Image (cartoon, rainbow, N blue to C red):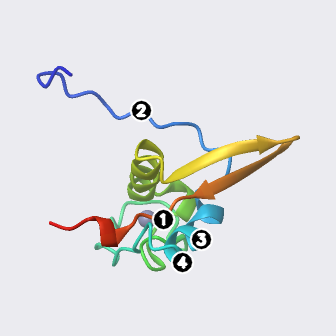
Amino acid sequence: MDKKVKKKREFDPLPILPSRLLPELIASKLITPMPPKPANPQAPGPNARCEYHIGGIRHWTNDCYHLRHRIQDLLDHQLLSFYLRGRDVYYALKNPCPSLQDE
Ligand SMILES: [Zn+2]
């Protein structure tokens, strides 16, 4: 890893829309919704809602950059994975084990 070069993070392609994954990820406590930050008044879509940002912030859940990062974190840690069965894409969640994370 070269720390001098700050590379833009590459995201794995998501076969399932973030808005479809999010409710399950929240229910599994893999993702915690964020309180919305003040919206950029220049941002398009004053009616857009982001479920990750608790319904706020002028963008749609599927366009949420922060959520995309969180999902990529889960993929990187293999807490979330996708698999194909026939022509359908499924996903699998692995719950982290808090009891094993003694400090
Ligand atoms: Zn958002």
Report if the CB atoms under discs 3 and 1 are less than 8 Å apart: no
3D distance between C-alphas at marks 4 and 3: 5 Å
Q: Amino acid at mark 2?
A: Glu
Quadrant (top left/top right/bottom left/bottom right) for the N terminus: top left
**Is label 2 in a helix, a strand or a loop?**
loop
Quarter-of-image position of residue 23? bottom right
**Is label 4 in a helix, a strand or a loop?**
helix
Q: Position of residue 71 (x, y in %)?
A: 47, 53
**Is label 3 in a helix, a strand or a loop?**
helix
Q: Which mark is residue 81?
A: none
In the image, 89: left or right of 44?
right
Q: Amino acid at mark 4?
A: Ala
Q: Which mark is residue 10?
A: 2
Q: Which mark is residue 27?
A: 4
Closest to the camera, between mark 4 and mark 2, is 4
Q: Position of residue 49 (x, y in %)?
A: 53, 73
Closest to the camera, between mark 3 and mark 1, is 1
Q: For the residue carrying disc 4, how many other residues have a C-alpha within 10 Å: few (<14), some (14-19), or many (20+)? A: few
Q: Which mark is residue 95?
A: 1
Q: Is residue 1 above or below residue 95?
A: above
- Tell which of 63 and 46 is nearer to you: 63
Q: Amino acid at mark 3?
A: Glu
Q: Amino acid at mark 1?
A: Asn
3D distance between C-alphas at marks 1 and 4: 11 Å
Report if the CB atoms under discs 4 and 3 are less than 8 Å apart: yes
Report if the CB atoms under discs 4 and 2 are less than 8 Å apart: no
Q: Earlier in the sequence, mark 3 or mark 1?
A: 3
